[in-house]
Image (cartoon, rainbow, N blue to C red):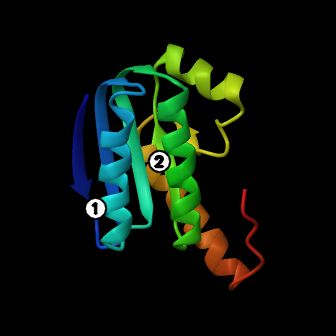
C-alpha cells in the first residue's frame, strides 16, 4: 500500500491510500493518520479512490481515526467511488459514520458542513461512539 499526505491547511489534510488496506498494511495507515492528529490536523479526508481492497482491520483503523478526529474537534470523511469498497461501508453500517462520499471535493464540502454545524451548536453535547 502507498500512502500520500497532502496538507490543505493547518487543520485539514488529505490522506491518499492506494493498493490494499489489510491486516498487514493497516498499521502503516494508522501511523500516518496518527501523525497527522499529533500535528494538530483534526479534519482528515481519507482518499480511497485508488484503494483496491479493504478488510475489517483497515475498516477499524478508519473508524478509530474518525473517533480520534471527533475527540480533537474535527472529523473524517472518506472519498471513495469503488463499488466493492462502497459495499463494505454499506454492509458494515459505517457509510454515515465515516462520511463516505464520491470524491475529495465532496469530502471537503462534507467536512465544511460538519464544521459549520458544530460552530452553530456552539459547544453542544458531543456523544462518543
Lower sequence index among marks 2 and 1:
1
Instruction: Point out residue 107 in the picture as x, y percentages from the top left corner.
Output: 47, 47
Q: Secondary structure at mark 2?
A: helix
Neighbor class of circle 1 (other Cα within 10 Å; few <14, some 14-19, many 20+) is some
Check the picture and name the quadrant holding the C terminus. Answer: bottom right
Residue indicated by mark 2: 107
Instruction: Point out residue 87 in the picture as x, y percentages from the top left corner.
Output: 61, 18
Seen in the picture, residue 16 relative to 125 is either above or below; the reply is above
Q: Quadrant of residue 39?
A: bottom left
Query: Could you tell me if the residues under marks 2 and 1 are in contact, i.e. CB atoms within 8 Å?
Result: no
**Residue at x-position 36% and y-position 74%:** 40
Q: Is residue 14 left or right of residue 115?
A: left
Residue indicated by mark 1: 8
**Residue at x-position 21% and y-position 43%:** 4
Check the picture and name the quadrant holding the N terminus. Answer: top left
Q: Is residue 112 left or right of residue 24?
A: right
Neighbor class of circle 2 (other Cα within 10 Å; few <14, some 14-19, many 20+) is many
Instruction: Point out residue 99 in the picture as x, y percentages from the top left corner.
Output: 59, 45
Instruction: Point out residue 103 in the picture as x, y percentages from the top left corner.
Output: 42, 37
In the foreground, 75 or 71: 71
Amino acid at each position: 500500500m502507498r500512502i500520500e499526505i497532502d496538507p490543505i491547511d493547518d487543520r485539514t489534510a488529505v490522506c491518499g491510500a492506494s493498493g490494499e488496506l489489510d491486516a498487514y498494511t493497516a498499521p502503516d495507515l494508522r501511523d500516518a493518520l496518527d501523525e497527522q492528529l499529533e500535528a494538530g490536523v483534526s479534519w482528515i479526508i481519507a482518499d480511497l479512490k485508488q484503494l483496491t481492497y479493504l478488510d475489517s482491520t483497515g475498516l477499524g483503523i478508519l473508524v478509530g481515526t474518525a473517533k480520534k478526529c471527533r475527540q480533537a474537534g474535527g472529523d473524517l470523511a472518506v472519498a471513495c467511488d469503488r463499488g466493492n469498497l462502497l459495499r463494505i461501508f454499506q454492509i458494515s453500517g459505517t457509510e454515515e459514520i465515516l462520511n463516505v462520499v464520491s470524491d475529495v471535493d465532496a469530502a471537503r464540502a462534507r467536512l465544511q458542513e460538519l464544521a459549520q454545524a458544530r460552530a452553530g451548536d456552539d459547544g453542544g453535547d458531543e456523544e462518543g461512539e
